Amino acid sequence: MSEVLLNKYEKEKRVIELHLASKTRREIAKELRMSFTSISKIIKAYERKIRLQTKREESNQSTQPKKSPISTQAFKLFRDGKKLTDVAIELEIPARKALKLFSQFLGLERMEDCYEFYKDYRYDIPTFLSINNFIKRNNISGNNIADVLRTANDVNNLNQTQYNLKTEVKNLEQRKMYLQNYSTSPYSLQPLPFNKPNNNYYYY
């Protein structure tokens, strides 16, 4: 009985609620004592309103600027001189992903060789910087450095050759001492005279 006393707006609201609850028009008509035509008009008006609202929201979203991909954001930050740690924190990405993006950025900037050099020799960088400072202080050219490196390589080869010769001399001296001690032993083999016809060349 209470449903009959609902005013027009309350009935429309109730129709929509029952419709969203998957009630049929027959069930709605029975509960609210309304005609199928009135119920259909209310439901169609509601669905039209929902379609317009959805279309309006989609239109607003399309006009809003899209957020750039993570890679684009990272490249911009690297270009602005941001450090790897700052980029990883700002974009909230793992360190591994930040390193990968940094490597890609260097590739785009044609500096991938620098990064590969850094990965291979990052622990020797302090030494390289000392050499660089020495070169600048003494106005040494690149050709001079090449000559120094070739000379250093020759010195290394000479040192290795010297070590090998010392080792060989030591081995020969040990061999000589062994042969001297062995030949003076009364039990050592002695060579036979050349004029003695015997097939054995040594005797005890």
Image (tube, grey):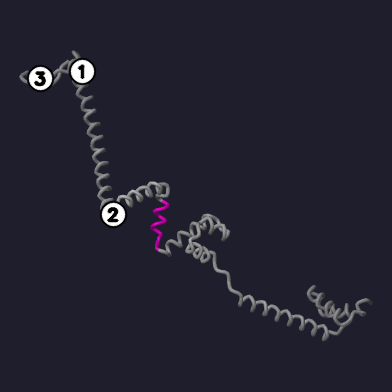
Q: Which residue is mark 3?
A: 198
In x, y percent, where is residue 84? 50, 56
Pointer 3: residues within 10 angstroms few (<14), some, or many (20+)?
few
Label 1 secondary element = helix
Start and end of the magenta stretch?
110-119
Quick check: 153 above or below 182?
below
Q: Nearer the viewer, residue 139 or 95?
A: 139
User: How far apart in space, not on screen, are marks 3 and 1 (Cα)?
Assistant: 27 Å
Q: Nearer the viewer, residue 35 or 162?
A: 162
Amino acid type, label 1: Asn
Quick check: 193 above or below 43?
above
Residue 142 badge: 2
Tell me the quarter of the picture where residue 40 sits: bottom right
User: How far apart in space, not on screen, are marks 2 and 1 (Cα)?
Assistant: 59 Å
Residue 68 painted magenta: no
Amino acid type, label 3: Asn
Locate residue 45 relative to residue 122 in the image: left or right.
right
Q: Main secondary structure of the magenta part?
A: helix
User: How far apart in space, not on screen, are marks 2 and 3 (Cα)?
Assistant: 74 Å
Q: Which residue is mark 1?
A: 181
